[in-house]
Image (cartoon, rainbow, N blue to C red):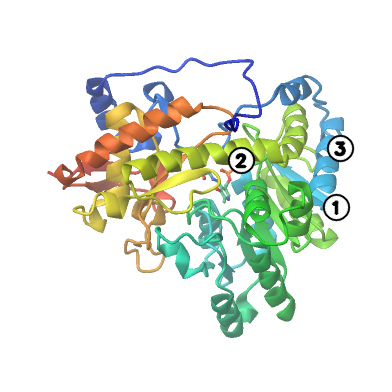
């Protein structure tokens, strides 16, 4: 008999979580104005709001925490992080920041100015926020396949190189750099192929522009290249990672994802001039260049996390858990962005709650229903997140309306995934009775989804 697959870790420390009653959840959800971000975590049984900073560190990472050097300047921990970034990613220069969006703030302070256009494959919301805040434009050139949740294309995170080439032909003088987001979070944790990365590089070279990677889930991306792209099956994840970044001029990193730490990030670059300019902003916004927004212990843990996060066994365990949840949803006939992504399952809320108009936020409605059903918290990746057009102030309705169930690294077991799938099935079975969504009663002018207040439509 073939042995079944099992996790490549055992568990040494646990944290209790608690179930609640439907009645309790109804009250808590109402008190939170139907915004899942506003729920206390104690009110959540299985928390799939995000895979960011929510993973479990290894014994080796925890032991490195004790060895942190907290010197203000030139700490050993800084050099540990510098060596890991050089050895694993092959960037000579880097600046620690407190998280990914801080890295965007520091780097974009150097590279982005009013009127610029930054083409990329589905800019993440903070990336778009930092671009639009500077009165520049985030131009999406993702492949159209990403809009069809039922297409099984292996690299739905890709840039459409024709769209990119057209954008460059028209706007090159306004483009400070080309952006590659790996994996493509907004399109469903979908990977970008090496072929596409090379294509973006070629277009950048033609127009003499740098390429910047938003690298939050670069290791998951490398795993997909290894397992899906011809010619890479015999390369190690670490070799693929090096090849991916050989096409980058700079990167921003949210270390809370693939470097498996609870807090941290960095900017890395191959260019001394970018580094020197960015250093000034880092000192202003984050901290001195050898700690940025991070403590020494966190830089130590990050250095180990980069190494562990690019090991095949770790990635296989992680991505197979996401796939496990996807297969359960297949059993129940629940539509999601196919094939299952690197860090999350993205349920197709438009298809599940097809009686709810876009204006009433079907993905948010599904998220609230799932929470009420079983205390499972996901997050809306739809019209609330897409926000208003900065110029017209009209609501933007993206092609996809998704409920993201993001799975923290090394945190939950497949029993938890069974509960999530069963809860979703219960909601799915009564989907025809869910006919009304929500309206916004209060929102902020940018990145409204974090703080928005909603009311049920009666
Ligand atoms: N880029 C991508 C692709 C991201 O997914 C995130 C964060 C960031 C940048 C910003 O990093 O949070 O460290 O400031 N994504 C989280 C999520 C929040 O839930 O997907 P950060």
Task: Answer few, some or many: residues within 10 Å of disc 1's Cα (few below 14, many 20 plus, some between 14 and 19).
Answer: some
SS assignment at label 1: loop
- Asked if the beta carbon under badge 2 is closer than 8 A to the nearest atom of ligand 1, the reply is yes
Residues at marks 1 and 2, CA–CA distance in whole angstroms: 22 Å
The residue shown at (77%, 47%) is 238
Tags 3 and 2 in contact by the CB under 8 Å rule? Answer: no
Q: Quadrant of the C terminus?
A: top left
Q: Is residue 299 above or below residue 221?
A: above
Which residue is outermost to the bottom? Answer: 169
In this view of the protein, can residue 81 be seen by the observer? yes
Q: Nearer the viewer, residue 288 or 10?
A: 10
Residue 18 image-quadrant placement: top left
Residue 200: % across, % down: 66, 70
Residue 15: % across, % down: 53, 16
Write down the residue under mark 1.
Answer: 92
Write down the residue under mark 2.
Answer: 257
Left of 255 or right of it: where is 408?
A: left
Please report whichever mark, 1 or 2, sits nearer to the chain's N-terminal start.
1
Residues at marks 3 and 2, CA–CA distance in whole angstroms: 21 Å
Q: Nearer the viewer, residue 450 or 375?
A: 375
Residue 281: % across, % down: 71, 51
Residue 305: % across, % down: 72, 35
Please report whichever mark, 1 or 3, sits nearer to the chain's N-terminal start.
3
The residue shown at (39%, 53%) is 445
Write down the residue under mark 3.
Answer: 79
Q: Is residue 455 above or below residue 77?
A: below
SS assignment at label 2: loop
Residue 312 image-quadrant placement: top right
In this view of the protein, can residue 51 be seen by the observer? no
Residues at marks 1 and 3, CA–CA distance in whole angstroms: 12 Å
């Amino acid at each position: 008999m073939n042995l079944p697959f099992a996790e490549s870790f055992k568990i040494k420390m646990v944290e209790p979580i608690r179930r609640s009653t439907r009645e309790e959840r109804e009250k808590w959800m109402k008190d939170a104005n139907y915004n899942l971000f506003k729920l206390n975590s104690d009110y959540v049984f299985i928390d799939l709001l995000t895979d960011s900073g929510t993973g479990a560190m290894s014994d080796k990472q925890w032991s490195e925490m004790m060895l942190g050097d907290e010197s203000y300047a030139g700490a050993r921990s800084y050099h540990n992080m510098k060596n890991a970034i050089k050895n694993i990613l092959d960037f000579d220069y880097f600046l620690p920041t407190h998280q990914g969006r801080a890295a965007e703030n520091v780097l974009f302070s150097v590279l982005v100015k009013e009127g610029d256009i930054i083409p990329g494959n589905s800019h993440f919301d903070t990336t778009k926020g930092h671009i639009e805040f500077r009165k520049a434009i985030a131009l999406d050139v993702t492949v159209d396949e990403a809009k069809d949740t039922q297409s099984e294309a292996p690299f739905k995170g890709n840039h459409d190189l024709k769209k990119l080439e057209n954008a460059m032909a028209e706007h090159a003088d306004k483009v400070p750099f080309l952006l590659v987001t790996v994996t493509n979070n907004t399109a469903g944790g979908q990977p970008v192929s090496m072929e596409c990365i090379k294509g973006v590089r070629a277009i950048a070279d033609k127009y003499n522009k740098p390429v910047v990677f938003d690298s939050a889930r670069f290791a998951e991306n490398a795993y997909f290249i290894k397992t899906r792209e011809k010619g890479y099956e015999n390369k190690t994840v670490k070799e693929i990672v090096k090849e991916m970044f050989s096409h980058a001029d700079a990167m921003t990193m949210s270390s809370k994802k693939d470097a498996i730490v609870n807090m941290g990030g960095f900017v890395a670059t191959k260019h001394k001039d970018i580094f020197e300019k960015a250093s000034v902003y880092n000192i202003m916004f984050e901290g001195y260049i050898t700690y940025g927004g991070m403590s020494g212990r966190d830089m130590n843990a990050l250095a180990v996390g980069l190494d562990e996060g690019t090991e095949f066994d770790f990635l296989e365990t992680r991505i197979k858990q996401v796939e496990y949840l996807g297969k359960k949803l297949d059993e129940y006939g629940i539509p999601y962005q196919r094939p299952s992504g690197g860090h999350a399952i993205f349920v197709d809320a438009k298809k599940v709650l097809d009686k709810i108009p876009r204006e009433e936020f079907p993905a948010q409605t599904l998220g609230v229903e799932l929470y009420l059903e079983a205390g499972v918290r996901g997050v809306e990746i739809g019209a609330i997140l897409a926000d208003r057009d900065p110029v017209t102030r009209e609501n933007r309705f993206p092609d996809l309306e998704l409920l993201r169930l993001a799975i923290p690294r090394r945190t939950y077991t497949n029993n938890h995934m069974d509960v999530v799938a069963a809860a979703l099935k219960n909601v799915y079975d009564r989907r025809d009775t869910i006919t009304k969504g929500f309206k916004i009663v209060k929102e902020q002018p940018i990145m409204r989804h974090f703080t928005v207040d909603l009311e049920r439509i009666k």
